[in-house]
Image (cartoon, coloured by chain):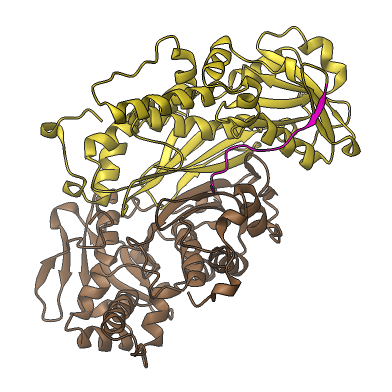
Chain colours: A brown, B yellow
Amino acid sequence: MTLNKENRTELNEFGEFGLINHLTKNIKIKNLSTIKGVGDDAAVIENKDKVTLVSTDLLIEGVHFDLTYTPLKHLGYKAVVVNISDIVAMNGKANQITVSISVSSRFSVEAIEEMYSGILLACEKYDVDLVGGDTTSSVSGLYLSITVIGEADTEKIVYRNTAKEGDLLVVTGDLGAAYTGLLLLEREKQVFKANPDMQPDLEGYDYIVGRQLKPEARTDIQKVLEGIEVLPTSMIDISDGLASEILHVCTGSELGCTIYEEKIPLDPTTINAATEFSIDPTTCALNGGEDYELLFTVSHNDYEKIKDVMGLSVIGHMTGKDTGTNLISGSGTSVPIKAQGWDALR
Amino acid sequence: MTLNKENRTELNEFGEFGLINHLTKNIKIKNLSTIKGVGDDAAVIENKDKVTLVSTDLLIEGVHFDLTYTPLKHLGYKAVVVNISDIVAMNGKANQITVSISVSSRFSVEAIEEMYSGILLACEKYDVDLVGGDTTSSVSGLYLSITVIGEADTEKIVYRNTAKEGDLLVVTGDLGAAYTGLLLLEREKQVFKANPDMQPDLEGYDYIVGRQLKPEARTDIQKVLEGIEVLPTSMIDISDGLASEILHVCTGSELGCTIYEEKIPLDPTTINAATEFSIDPTTCALNGGEDYELLFTVSHNDYEKIKDVMGLSVIGHMTGKDTGTNLISGSGTSVPIKAQGWDALR
């Protein structure tokens, strides 16, 4: 935070309601499904003949984010995006969020406004209404709890446990970038701690730092798939690393899978950074997490439709359960896929 | 917590997914509107021709609850009830909740199970499905974030800002009990801190201690009002004290009000306890909070229907905005109503 003392308003200058009113006073409702937003005991939402999707995430300072290198505006933006990503992973459209924050007196009103500006920026970009929430003090640190509400056509919802044997495994974009971005930010933090006069050296790494600090939800993929008339047979977003998500799909669908290391999409910057940190780039993709790309399965009959679509990579296929979950390495050896992904209960 | 060391399982013996699975494995879905509960990126809810209501609350150790005298099972129960109360205050029916918890390693798996048993007991009692959530570690303390999803007929939703001039102000049950219960528990905590051999002296105070530790949501009032064919013109639940809620209704409806001190319903135990603490019982009702009773307005034409209903008290009426918000004391003097209610950003 670079806010100077003169611009600091203490949180206790507002009451609880005062702060909520202050933060939400300029909110305009955009979605027709939002009948009533902030300001009553509950928000009112009308989805008519569609079903309602609900997902929730809790983000905690010192566990999920480090304010040393996470600007508060980015934090707010990312917190909304990761929730929208869960709705996208059901093949739905996010329409509303509620935001609950708990902050210690270390934070000024201006700091919370900065975080809210990121939250509202994401709402603007993804066409989502902020319809409620809670604001309280905390004993220490910053806690952010977001619930997202979305809608979907019943016949278009895609679950994670409905893959079929022989289906192709497809991922969007590239993987592992957010994790290498985190490694870089952590390194620069240590450098800064050792010598506060040092400036962070992130040159050439904009892409991976951006992937860590300002991820986006793949709302564009729905249109791409509708355009080629493909409905995934199962889908999940890649928040905890490819390995963990593949295992969710396999376990849920009671199947195994085979994926090919050389098919896993990696950005050159990710490969460079991983090499610099002496880590296998594939490990970053499998276990790094926070990419918020999509992993989905399609019928093998859809191969011709999907194979040349920019930004989609077929990385393998679903097998019977007995085959297990296998990664075929570049050299042709088969290794079992294990989830060593982010474990929030470290 | 009275759990002995031998029965203590450390949280890190489960991973994040392990703990969620462990806590939710026995959950059975009861509501027809719950299409998909725990286990995918989002829960799926179908409310057909009804609208969806969403409300959220964040409860923080050291701010909203004190585990010295709050059993974890009661905490879980109360956390669900206060959310259901928000849906009741919209004249809706709560159907689903999501539960996000953040706990430090101070807590064992058994302690979290105990809290979940209270959460699930409330779900059972109020016919609510637990459909999702998040489980993470915290740097310190226990954080509990609950979002409740409900349904209502569009034409039966009751907002807080739709009272009309001349409407009667009605409250359910009695007020101030939860606050005097809190005062008592705080006193016994201080006694215990001074001398750990002392046993808490709560005799004769079961009622107010129960109101603090195990409140209930007034789901029964909907049937009562339907039975006498009264639809409130506005409604809010009394979570922050009667004064604060009345001001919400008045401000929202752009009206004033007059209420009568002698009409505010108080339980004899509340009066006794308040007297013991040298506090005016009316102050407990106005500013105490956490009663989770309902405050609503009805047309003055409904007075005959409502006046003899057990458990409902007409405490005053809505006036023009210019009259202000006034409490007529027992001696006949008029004092402006001010919200000194619980301020979570103390």
**Residue in view at x 32 percent, y 60 percent:** A63
Left or right placement of residue B167 versus residue A307 in this view:
right
Q: Is residue B340 magenta?
A: yes
Magenta stretch: give its range: B333-346
Please identify the quarter of the rendering in which residue A196 is found.
bottom left
Left or right placement of residue A10 versus residue B131 in this view:
right
**Residue in view at x 67 percent, y 8 percent:** B310
Can residue A308 be seen at all in this image of the molecule?
A: no
Please identify the quarter of the rendering in which residue B125 is found.
top left
Q: Nearer the viewer, residue B84 or B30?
A: B84
Q: Is residue B66 positioned above or below A230 on the image?
A: above
Left or right placement of residue B234 versus residue B208 in this view:
right
Left or right placement of residue B87 versus residue A71 in this view:
right
Please provide percent x and percent y for residue B15.
22, 51
Residue most toward the bottom?
Answer: A203
Please provide percent x and percent y for residue B227.
71, 12
